[in-house]
Image (spheres, grey):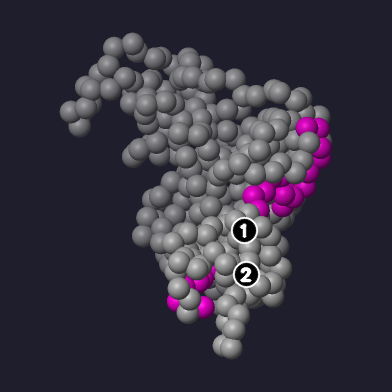
Amino acid sequence: MGTEILAIACDQQILRSYILPFAGSVLVRTGQEVEAGEPLAEIKMPERYQVFDVVNGLKINPSNIERHIERLVGEPVKAGDVVAQKSGLISRIFRAPQDGMVVAIRDGRITLALGEKKLQVLATYPGTVVEIIPERGAVVAVQGLLLQGVWGNGLNSSGELVSLDAAEPAAGKKQPAADLQGKIAVVPHVATKAAFAALLSREPAGLVLGSVMPELLPALEQAPLPVMVLVGFGEYEIDALSKAMLRQMEDQTVYLNANEADASEQSRPDLILPGKAQVSPGLFREELRLEVGRRVRLLGKPYTGSTGEIMELPEEPEKFASGLVMRTVVVRREDDLIVRIPRENVELILE
């Protein structure tokens, strides 16, 4: 199992790949400045398909079908164009209901691809295009402050960052309606569904939650706005490093990308405050690994959310109380407590 990388950085070059699920058109060029929400690549697809049964629809003999079809496969059609017809005393006509294309004629049926819709990948923060991925997308870079979390609901937005007290969302009726409109709100902990509902009623643009009780997960998943969990599910404090970063971001416009965590792609939900530094095309993150002296954040009770420094990396696996034999890491926490835990239970902090 590879080491999880947790980025908490004040002056980090942030790079994100935006990739279409299959081949399409790239809309940007290397060196181009893009804004949040700007399309980077797109695929044009039919809005819908329509299948017309020529034999039964026109009431014709199947052996004569070819003489009744007016269009060829691959031929574009306009709304109202005749696609197939039967002339005579009782004429029957099949017309294209909207603009499109004939995509198949098979077994006495005509298939039309109708209309057009676009599937686009959009930049989630302002930056510079540093690499083009042919027919698929682009890599966008920006210099700035980066804070990553452990869970996101897949949405993104931007707004002024404001910090709330843990008890404040529960006040509910005392808070004016929609007082958080256009703002990304940071809350240290949410314990109940009522507190979360009270937060949503204030209509923030997004939520950054230090920790949240596990039973709230369905509500987080269904939230109509981006939600990122910083530390984990349970009752945990935000670590000192993340608190300091949030203080620096406060009252400034930040970009919350609450994408779902994907360890295979080293993708995490994150909060970004873009800076003004120039980016260097082609500069990508070096491969990182556990080393003595590196900062880490700990996972698993009772250490979840605490941070510290690696003191030792024993070569030989050790047997834990659970019966599992695993490679270990020795960490000195911020409170000077030295702990010995499995390597799988640490996140390497990229500073």
Q: Quadrant of the N terminus?
A: top left
Residue 303: percent from the left, percent from the top? 38, 36
Q: Quadrant of the C terminus?
A: top right
Q: Which residues are magenta?
A: 30-58
> Tag 1: residue type?
Leu
Q: Is residue 239 visible?
A: yes
Q: Work out whether residue 86 or residue 319 is closer to the camera in this orientation and state it.
A: 86
Residue at 54 percent across and 64 percent down: it is 66
76 drawn magenta: no
- The residue that disc 1 covers is 72
- The residue that disc 2 covers is 83
> Tag 2: residue type?
Val
Residue at 69 percent across and 54 percent down: it is 158
Residue at 59 percent across and 20 percent down: it is 286
Using the image, determine if residue 287 lies above or below residue 298: above
Q: Is residue 191 visible?
A: no
Secondary structure category for the residue under label 2: strand
The numbered mark, 2 or 1, whose residue comes first in the sequence reads 1
Callout 2: 10 Å neighbours few (<14), some, many (20+)? many
Task: Determine the CA span between mark 2 and mark 1.
Answer: 9 Å
43 drawn magenta: yes
Using the image, determine if residue 3 lies above or below residue 184: above
Residue at 44 percent across and 69 percent down: it is 62
